[in-house]
Image (spheres, rainbow, N blue to C red):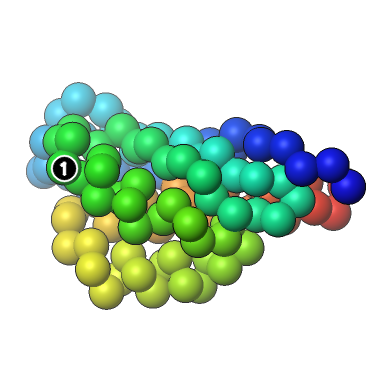
Amino acid sequence: MEKRDIFLTGYAKLPRGITATELYSVIAVGIVVEYPSGNIKDVDCSLVTSTAKVFVKDMMVGKNIMDFDVIERDFNTVYFGSARKALISAVKSCHEKFTQIEHN
């Protein structure tokens, strides 16, 4: 199978009372994944601060989208921002989309 990059997106509702919610009602996560390996090559999200965006990107690039349990564990271990649950949910949506592609 030929290697190629694919783009996945996931969305999740943000909690009340944080800055991102004032700007957006949902968080968006975009992930560039090498297909078929599942290796994550790039990540962006709609968090407000550039520090948070870079942190999420650095945490995920180099991991595999199929290893969602590892990604979720990392979020729960090192990310203590208020949008953590929403980020995990959005990334899980990307993982599920990749799994669907794999089975088509």
Residue 10 visible here: no
68, above or below 15, in the image: below
Mark 1: secondary structure: helix
Q: Residue at x 52, y 45 (%)?
A: 41
Which residue reaches farthest top?
23
Residue that numbered label 1 is attached to: 51
| Residue 38 drawn at (x, y percent) | 65, 54
8, above or below 36, in the image: above
Q: Nearer the viewer, residue 62 or 18?
A: 62
Q: Would residue 13 be found to the left or right of residue 103 on screen?
A: left
Q: Nearer the viewer, residue 47 or 40?
A: 40
Q: Residue at x 62, y 63 (%)?
A: 66
Disc 1 residue type (three-letter): Thr
Quarter where residue 59 is shown: bottom left
| Residue 91 drawn at (x, y percent) | 47, 51
| Residue 6 drawn at (x, y percent) | 66, 36
Q: Residue at x 60, y 44 (%)?
A: 33
Residue 6 visible here: yes
| Residue 15 drawn at (x, y percent) | 23, 47
Q: Nearer the viewer, residue 51 or 92?
A: 51
